[in-house]
Image: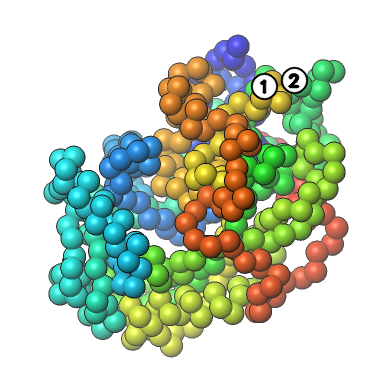
C-alpha cells in the first residue's frame, strides 16, 4: 500500500500527464514525490510545450463529454490555471466532409436535448459564420456549415505548464533533469516482477515505492506496451502579424475545420500559429524498449528540441499554407517560420492507458494521449492519483485498463486512414541517425541537473 510518505517517481514529470500527476499528488499531501525528465518544465519534448491549445465543451455524452466539462470548470475556477484560459468560443466547421457535418449536427441536437442548447449555435450559411467570425470576411467559406460553441476557446499551453512546474517547486516536489532524469530502465527485484525504482541514462539509480511512467509519445519506445499505443506526429508553422492586425483578431473565436486545419488568435507579439488537419505521420525504426527481449519495429519519435534543423514535409507546408490562403488570403504570402513537428501517442481505441502495469508491481502507466490530454492538464492527474488510491470508478478502470488483447488490425486511435511514414515524404530534411534513436540515447547529450 502507498502512504503519504511513500517515495514516488513520476517519469516524464515535466510534460502534461506527468506534471499534472505530480501536482495532484502534492495537493493530496504526498511528501516524497520526484519528477524526472530530460528537460525542465515545460519539457521541450512535450507536445504541451506550445504557444496555445484549443479547449471546448461541445461533447456532452460519454467519457470525453464528462471530462470536457470537468476540465472547463477547472480552467475557470482553479487559481493555478485561470490566468491561462481565453474563453473566446470556437467554430467547428466543415464543407465537403458530410460525415463530419452529420456528427456536428448530432452534437448540436444532443446539446439541446440535454439542456445545453444555450452553449451551441448552428451556423448554416456564410452569413452566420461571419456574424460569429468577421475575421473570415476575406476568406473562402461559402458553403461551410457547423457549430459555434460558447464555452470554448484556447489556453496558453506553455505558460500553463511553466506555472505547474513552479507550483511543484513551491509544494516541495523534488526533481531530476538532464541525463540523471532520463529513463533507461526499471530496477526490478529478484522476482523480476517488482519495480523498485528507475535507472537513468547516466547510471543514476532512483529507488521508489511507486513509479509512474508518463512519458508521452516516447512511452512505447521506453517500455514494451505490447502494441497498445502508436506514436504519430503533426506539423505546424507561424506567421508574423502587425500590431493593427493583432488588434483586429483579439478575442476572436478559434476555428477548426476537419478538412483544413485550425488556428487561434495571435499572441500579443503578433505570432499566429496554423496547423493542418490530417491523420499524422509515423516514423518507423527499430528499438528495444524495456521488457522486450528483441528489437521491435515501431514508430519512434524524433525530438525537435534535439534536432532543431529538421524540416517539415513539403506537403505539410503546402497544407498549412492552404489553411492560411483559405481563411486569410491577405496573409497568403507571409513567411512561415518556426515550422516544426510535434509528437503524440495514441492508444489503439482512443482511450487513455491509465493503469497499473500487470507485469510489474509498483508501476503505473499514464499515457495514450489521443489528442485530448493537454486541455485536461488541470484534471488528468486527479485520475492517476485516484487510481493509485483505489478511488477510480470501475467504469473508468475498465476503460483505461491494460488491454493488448483488444487491438484489431487497422486500429490507430483516431479517425482517418493509416498514417504515412515520414521517411517517405519529400522535403523532410534531417541529419542521419547515429545509433539508437530513442530518447534514452539522445539524453546522453544533455547536461546533468539534479535539483
Residue at 54% x, 74% y is 316
Pointer 2 and pointer 1: residues touching (CB < 8 Å)? yes
Task: State the colouring used for the structure image.
Answer: rainbow
Residue at 52% x, 33% y is 400
Quadrant for the C terminus, please. Answer: top right
Residue at the spot of label 1? 362
Residue at the spot of label 2? 194
Q: Give x and y (percent) for residue 16.
A: 52, 44
Residue at 45% x, 18% y is 391
| Horizontal side, residue 249 vs residue 259: left or right | left
Name the residue nearer the viewer: 234 or 98: 98
Q: Secondary structure at mark 2?
A: loop
Q: Give x and y (percent) for residue 263.
A: 38, 67
Residue at 45% x, 59% y is 51
In the rendered image of this protein, does residue 90 appear above or below residue 359? below
Decide which of tag 2 and tag 1 comes sooner along the chain: 2
Q: Give x and y (percent) for residue 385.
A: 50, 25
| Horizontal side, residue 145 vs residue 80: left or right | left
Amino acid at each position: 500500500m502507498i502512504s503519504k510518505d511513500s517515495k514516488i517517481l513520476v517519469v516524464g514529470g515535466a510534460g502534461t500527464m506527468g506534471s499534472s500527476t505530480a501536482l495532484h499528488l502534492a495537493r493530496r499531501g504526498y511528501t516524497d514525490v520526484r519528477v524526472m525528465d530530460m528537460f525542465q518544465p515545460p519539457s521541450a519534448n512535450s507536445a504541451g510545450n506550445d504557444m496555445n491549445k484549443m479547449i471546448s465543451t461541445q461533447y456532452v455524452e460519454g467519457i470525453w463529454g464528462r471530462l470536457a466539462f470537468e476540465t472547463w470548470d477547472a480552467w475557470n475556477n482553479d487559481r493555478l490555471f485561470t490566468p491561462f484560459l481565453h474563453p473566446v468560443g470556437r467554430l467547428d466547421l466543415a464543407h465537403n466532409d458530410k460525415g463530419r457535418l452529420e456528427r456536428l449536427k448530432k452534437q448540436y441536437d444532443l446539446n439541446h436535448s440535454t439542456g445545453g442548447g444555450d452553449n451551441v449555435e448552428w451556423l448554416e450559411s456564410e452569413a452566420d459564420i461571419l456574424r460569429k467570425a468577421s475575421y473570415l470576411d476575406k476568406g473562402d467559406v461559402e458553403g461551410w456549415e457547423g457549430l459555434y460553441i460558447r464555452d470554448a476557446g484556447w489556453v496558453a499551453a506553455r505558460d500553463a505548464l511553466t506555472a505547474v512546474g513552479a507550483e511543484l517547486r513551491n509544494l516541495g516536489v523534488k526533481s531530476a533533469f538532464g541525463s540523471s532524469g532520463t529513463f533507461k530502465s526499471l530496477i526490478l527485484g529478484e522476482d523480476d516482477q517488482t519495480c523498485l525504482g528507475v535507472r537513468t541514462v547516466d547510471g543514476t539509480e532512483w529507488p521508489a515505492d511507486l513509479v509512474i511512467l508518463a512519458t508521452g509519445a516516447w512511452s512505447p519506445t521506453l517500455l514494451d506496451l505490447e502494441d497498445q499505443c502508436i506514436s504519430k506526429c503533426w506539423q505546424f508553422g507561424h506567421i508574423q502579424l502587425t500590431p493593427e492586425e493583432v488588434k483586429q483578431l483579439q478575442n476572436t473565436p478559434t476555428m477548426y475545420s476537419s478538412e483544413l486545419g485550425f488556428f487561434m488568435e495571435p499572441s500579443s507579439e503578433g505570432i499566429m500559429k496554423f496547423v493542418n488537419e490530417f491523420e499524422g505521420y509515423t516514423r518507423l525504426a527499430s528499438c528495444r524498449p524495456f521488457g522486450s527481449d528483441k528489437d521491435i519495429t515501431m514508430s519512434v519519435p524524433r525530438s525537435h528540441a534535439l534536432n532543431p534543423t529538421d524540416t517539415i514535409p513539403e506537403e505539410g507546408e503546402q497544407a498549412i499554407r492552404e489553411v492560411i490562403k483559405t481563411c486569410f488570403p491577405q496573409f497568403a504570402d507571409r513567411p512561415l517560420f518556426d515550422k516544426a513537428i510535434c509528437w503524440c501517442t495514441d492508444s489503439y481505441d482512443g482511450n487513455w492507458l491509465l493503469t497499473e502495469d500487470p507485469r510489474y508491481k509498483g508501476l503505473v502507466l499514464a499515457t495514450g494521449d489521443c489528442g485530448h490530454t493537454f486541455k485536461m492538464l488541470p484534471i488528468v492527474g486527479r485520475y492517476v492519483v485516484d487510481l493509485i488510491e483505489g478511488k477510480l470508478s470501475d467504469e473508468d478502470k475498465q476503460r483505461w485498463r491494460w488491454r493488448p488483447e483488444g487491438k484489431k488490425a487497422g486500429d490507430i486511435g483516431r479517425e482517418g486512414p493509416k498514417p504515412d511514414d515520414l521517411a517517405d515524404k519529400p522535403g523532410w530534411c534531417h541529419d542521419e541517425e547515429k545509433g539508437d534513436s530513442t530518447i534514452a540515447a539522445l539524453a546522453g547529450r544533455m547536461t546533468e541537473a539534479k535539483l
